[in-house]
Amino acid sequence: MKQIMKNRFLILSVLAVNVIMAQEIAIPKSYSNIQKDEEGFFLRDGDQRHYAIESNARYSLKQLFGNPKGTEEGVKMDFGDFKGTITYGLIPYGKAPHPLPVFRFVKSLESGKVDINIKGDFRYPYDFVDWQKNQILSIGYRLTDETGMIVYDGEVSLKGKGPFTVAPSIYEGPFINMLTDTSATIWFNTTLPLAIELKIDEKTIKSPMATHHEIEVTNLKPGTKYDYSIKYGDFTQQYYLKTAPKPGSKAPFVFAYTSDSRHASGGGERKIYGANAYIMKKIAAVAHANDAAFMQFSGDLINGYLGTNAETQLQYTNWKKAVEPFWHYMPFQVGMGNHEALGYIFRDSTGRTKGFVDKFPFSTESAEVAFAEAFVNPVSTLQSEDGSVYDPSSKTIDFPSYSENVFHYRYDNVAVVVLNSDYWYAPTLPINTATSGGLHGYIMDNQLEWLENTITSLEADVTINHIFVTQHTPAFPNGGHSRDDMWYSGNNEKRPFVAGKPLEKGILERRDQYLDILINKSKKVLAILTGDEHNYNRLKLTDEVTIYPEDYPHQKLKVSRPIYQINNGAAGAPYYAQEVLPWSEHTKAFSVENAVCLFYVDGTTVKMKVINPDTLNLIDEIILR
């Protein structure tokens, strides 16, 4: 069992904060011009000091759980200083395959408090979950602030028929991940610590007292459907999973791809604080309805760019809740994008941002650690950029971890390699290199070496026919990000800085090294799956495509075989229209509609359909191989 002790919202977070406050925080040697005095961290700018702003979570999961307390008539909840309304209704667990709250009532919060009358609101004939008979029920609630923005969808479970007592709820999950032909990991998080029982394949597996549960199930049969149930206290949830086929079986299957679902305009579920839950829910439904074996999502899940992990975890939870009804049954594999940024933000006296760097200590506070806390992904052999040629010290941790944000997985004869092109991300680096940090779109040395080793290994695996490589940023942007991604308007001078020094290779040189691995050192890589640009398009890269600015002085890439770049950043973030770029005539099927890519794999053949999940119309269709 891969227990990383990700107990949400408070226990480890409070302990980590207490430890940090009790000791001096060492500034990573990989940064430059960042110092500390009695007022806190600051960015030195000549004689000026730009201090990191004090980041307090606008909202947190702990606050929005509402500290529920049972009463004679129902439940009282207290959301602190939250102002707005609560909408609530019963959740039909066991009565629907995708149990969602059936919202029925709306109340205004009084000083952040509300008293819900279960006996009155859900009397006969409104008791469709039989709570009066069974004396247990779960209520789903939605918090909307005074501006009308939906901030959180929560859950509270109760026992009794008056007086009522509060019971632990599974507030996110259960989810399926780490799926193979013989195993799977089932994980979920609860509002209160408790021990649980998982039943699957005539086996009962117990998980100890905790709020985060991560249970590995082994010794399963390939290509087999298994019902599973989770018993938590007096409550039970039941779903199913299906294991992958035996590697190399070449049985037909479908998988889905999309990215960029941060919240958008339009109100309602298009903006559930941090996430476009409206489109993500529809994308997940389309994937599930088409019997997708898994979904790959490559970055910008949330609005992000935050200063606290507490707020980051809330936005991640809102994203997870949007697709939760379908994640019960099939894996969602996720990667990082630039909006997952979590860091120190340095501002001048007028409030202007002068620097933004990945938060440290990297082992407890970074964007990468926050991402690993929120999701369950494979752990690769790649550790960090420590030990690279530009590592400023062999004795200290000077880079964040790659654990669970760079990895690969397989399903039958397909392998998917997930990269992090926003590693150690410093959002202000392109305009101010003083802090040092990672560059949006840049694959750093150790990650590039890991990619090459991984591709070499997959090339040698006779049971793999198709490789897909995915990262958030396109190699060839087409609309919205021509000034960055792996292009930067053709400016090769853009690159990461470590300890005040630029790396040897510029962004275009590094793009070419990356492409050389996928094209010239592989015959199996079929496509690059990207996002960042909020549109759908595909580009077939051949030796006829112009990919350099005029008078480019460096060695140019030899494109020995064609490869596709399929960009789908159309999962709900505000759209970007098409730009005119050197490769534009080779960019096909450009669309600003919301989109989900469905890949139909049948042995050595791969077809793709692209569907608008809102209207179900076909956007694109092509045989890729």
Image (tube, rainbow, N blue to C red):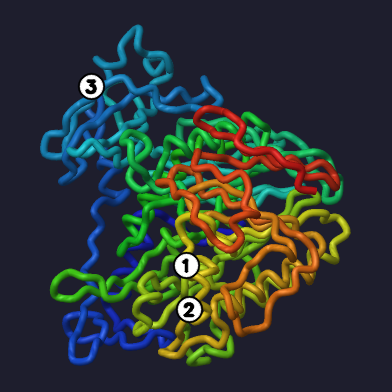
Q: Identify residue for label 3.
A: 117
- Please tell me which residue is depicted at 72% across the width and 41% down the height of the picture: 622
Query: Which quadrant of the figure contains the N terminus?
Result: bottom right
Identify the image quadrant of residue 75.
Answer: top left
Residue ranking furthest to the left: 111
Q: Which mark's residue is nearer the viewer, 1 or 3?
A: 1
Q: Secondary structure at mark 3?
A: strand
**Residue count near mark 1 (Cα–Cα under 10 Å), binned few <14, some 14–19, many ≥20:** many
Above or below, 545 relative to 177: below
Q: Which mark's residue is nearer the viewer, 3 or 2?
A: 2
Closer-to-camera residue (520/238): 520
Relative to 482, is 267 on the left or the right? left
**Residue count near mark 3 (Cα–Cα under 10 Å), binned few <14, some 14–19, many ≥20:** some
Q: Secondary structure at mark 2?
A: loop
Instruction: Give the Cα separation between the discs numbered 2 and 1.
Output: 9 Å
Q: Tell me which label, 1 or 3, sits earlier in the chain.
A: 3
Above or below, 354 relative to 155: below
Q: Secondary structure at mark 1?
A: loop
Closer-to-camera residue (330/130): 330
**Marks 2 and 1: CB-CB under 8 Å?**
yes
Residue 321, position in %: x, y? 44, 40
- Please tell me which residue is depicted at 27% across the width and 78% down the height of the picture: 22
Asked whether residue 193 is in view, the answer is no
Which residue type carries mark 2?
A: Lys
